[in-house]
Image: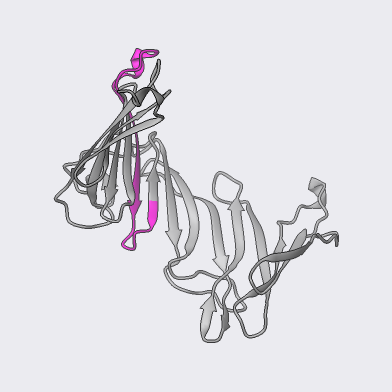
Amino acid sequence: SQVAPYADDYYRYDSRQRVTLETTQGAGATGPGTYAYSYTTSTNGSGYNSWQTKTVETLPDGNQNTVYTNYAGELMLTDFSDISDPANTALQGKHWITFDRYDSQGRLIEEAEPSAVTGYSDSYADLMNFQGGTSTYLSNSSGVINLHDYGASTTATSTTAGDVLGYAKDDKIQVGQSGTPILLDSTQYIAHTANGATVYPQATSTVYRNTDGTGAETTSDSYTWFASTNEIQSDTTSSPVISSSENGPGTADATTVYYDTYGRPVWTKDGDGFID
């Protein structure tokens, strides 16, 4: 009781050394505020789309964050619940839910924003009751859903840019789970082999400026290498071409960065020939 007025933080733990209570000076409306934490472990089987731990955080104002994670500790769902907003009673009882979904390798493939999530139930291992690729808790025609794709095979060679197995390939967006995915950006890679080992640095990065996934604008990279190694000696980045009709030069602006054998940038030459 004597130390408490001068303490910044106070913690309590459960038998598994998890925080169950945190009191922080200044976090409350008129002084210290208390955060409470409770944990639930499910009996679901291990899987990237099967929740294992539920954590409920009660905030100093009484509102709650509920978080579900899989056995690997990856985030599956977050639910912010407005329980007692004194400034806006219309918000009381509202939920803002974000849902993440993974592939068989634990890579994030789908992010559903609160605008697309209508609810959930932790009686289902996947929380969303997916049946045949469709969830009963995702809107069919409204809300934002972000999609992520990965290379299904390696097509990149030392001379031709392409995909790499398991590497990020593209990002898409769609309206509702029945919406048409629209391409936002994509990435390709180039192969380089030395001493029996192959690396795949980025070769191109493309963004699509139109709402139908067209209008590609591509930034490309080309490399030189230290002899008989996979260490990059220089990286030349060429920006998308800006045409003369858009007051551009009509050619790609290029910047080259040179590195030492420790991978540290040594000097840079821009498209006008200036060196730093």
Q: Residue at position x 24%, y 57% from top?
A: 47
Q: Residue at position x 22%, y 49% from top?
A: 52
Query: Can residue 126 be seen here?
Result: no
Q: Position of residue 39 (x, y in %)?
A: 22, 40
Query: Can residue 133 be seen here?
Result: yes
Q: Is 12 or 228 nearer to us in this picture?
A: 12
Q: Say which quarter of the image contains residue 56.
A: top left
Q: Position of residue 225 (x, y in %)?
A: 67, 77
Q: Residue at position x 24%, y 48% from top?
A: 51
Q: Residue furthest front?
A: 2
Region rendered in magenta: 82-109
> Can you say which quadrant of the picture contains the N terminus?
top left
Q: Is residue 77 above or below residue 108?
A: above
Q: Say which quarter of the image contains residue 234.
A: bottom right
Q: Is 226 or 115 nearer to us in this picture?
A: 226
Q: Position of residue 3 (x, y in %)?
A: 35, 26
Left or right, 170 with reference to 269: left
